[in-house]
């Protein structure tokens, strides 16, 4: 009976996944098509139609004045990667303490983590903005990295601790019997076992940080500090003299490429991390 049910359910799941994949790919494809058109073709042709020629100049314009999109990509990479590192430096030891270490405040820490990553960012954005003004860090990328890193550490702690508590106790006990202290156990025993899950969490945090818009808009007013989402919105709303729709579409494609490349590069690690989390639950 279970085999019959599986034979019925599996094709349905495959079709649902294909539909969801198409819904994800179609907007990207439309942006690519729009980004390769001329101004007149963008206004006169259908959204699925290519122009008579591929206008690669729409993409190249972002890397010359006044756009300087390369600097925006560098800013986004610096902030995204820096915030991920801050999150992991905070979250991994805390996860170790409340899962393997069985700290008595485990429930409190997890409750605070859930509250932080479920709290709407809009509710704390203005206090963060005021605090950056008070301490003289307004417009500083370092403050942006710390802010995203601290908020992201709550999400990372919640996920890592739930996977880490399924690390076999025998392995940790054996390390202690061999004379390993907590730091050695953390770095030499637990870290290698948790590496696929850590990389999965890092990828999720990276995408969140890359797409962050509100805090970047509030905390980074200088155009030389713009991240990719802010730079694209500046083009779209005419802060740099306005731009036709095909140029905005080309910018959106360029802005998504770094995240797409990283995901393609680490896709096997991502699958291993998700599988490890599922099997440990």
Image: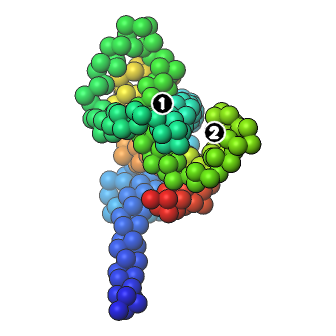
Residue 188 in the figure: left or right of residue 135: right
Task: Please state the total of marks drawn on the protein image.
Answer: 2
Q: Is residue 3 visible?
A: yes
Q: In this view, does 95 lie above or below 144?
A: below
The residue to which callout 1 is attached is: 149
**Mark-to-mark CA distance, 1 and 2:** 21 Å
Quarter the N terminus occupies: bottom left
In the current view of this chain or complex, which residue is farthest to the front?
177
Residue 129 on image: x %, y %: 34, 18
Where is residue 94? Give x, y as percent. Answer: 50, 34
Mark 2 = which residue? 186
The secondary structure type at the circle numbered 2 is helix
Q: In this view, does 166 lie to the left or right of 106?
A: right
Residues 211 and 184: in front is: 184
Nearer-the-camera pick, 165 or 231: 165
Query: Residue drawn at (32%, 58%), measured in percent from left and top?
Result: 44
Foreground pick, 45 / 196: 196
- How packed is label 2: few (under 14 Cα within 10 Å), some, or many (20 or more)? some
21 over 180 or under it: above or below:
below
Q: Could you say where residue 77 lies in the image, as x and y percent from the top left?
A: 56, 35
State the residue at coordinates (45%, 52%): 35
Among the 4 quarters of the image, the one containing residue 186: top right
Question: Residue at horizontal 35%, vertical 74%?
Answer: 16
Q: Is mark 1 on a helix, strand or loop?
A: helix
- Would residue 57 be seen by someone viewing this image from the given angle? no
Q: Residue at x 34, y 20 (%)?
A: 128
Q: In which quarter of the image is the C terminus?
A: bottom left
């Amino acid at each position: 009976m279970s085999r019959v049910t599986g034979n019925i359910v599996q094709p349905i799941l495959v079709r649902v996944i294909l539909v969801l994949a198409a819904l994800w790919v179609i907007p990207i494809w439309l942006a690519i098509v729009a980004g390769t058109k001329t101004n007149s073709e963008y206004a006169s042709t259908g959204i699925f139609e290519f122009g008579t020629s591929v206008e690669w100049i729409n993409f190249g314009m972002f890397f010359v004045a006044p756009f300087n999109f390369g600097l925006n990509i560098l800013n986004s990479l610096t902030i995204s990667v820096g915030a991920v590192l801050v999150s992991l430096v905070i979250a991994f030891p805390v996860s170790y303490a409340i899962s393997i270490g069985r700290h008595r405040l485990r429930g409190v820490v997890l409750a605070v983590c859930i509250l932080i990553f479920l709290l709407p960012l809009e509710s704390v954005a203005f206090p963060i903005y005021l605090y950056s003004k008070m301490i003289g860090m307004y417009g500083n990328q370092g403050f942006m990295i710390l802010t995203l890193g601290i908020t992201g550490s709550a999400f990372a702690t919640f996920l890592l601790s739930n996977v880490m508590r399924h690390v076999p106790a025998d392995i940790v006990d054996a390390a202690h019997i061999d004379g390993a202290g907590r730091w050695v156990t953390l770095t030499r025993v637990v870290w290698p076992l948790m590496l696929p899950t850590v990389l999965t969490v890092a990828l999720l945090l990276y995408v969140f940080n890359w797409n962050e818009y509100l805090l970047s808009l509030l905390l980074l007013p200088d155009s030389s500090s713009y991240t990719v989402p802010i730079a694209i919105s500046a083009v779209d709303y005419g802060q740099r003299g306005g731009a036709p729709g095909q140029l905005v579409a080309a910018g959106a494609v360029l802005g998504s490429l770094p995240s797409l490349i990283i995901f393609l590069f680490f896709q096997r690690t991502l699958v291993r991390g998700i599988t490890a989390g599922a099997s440990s639950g």
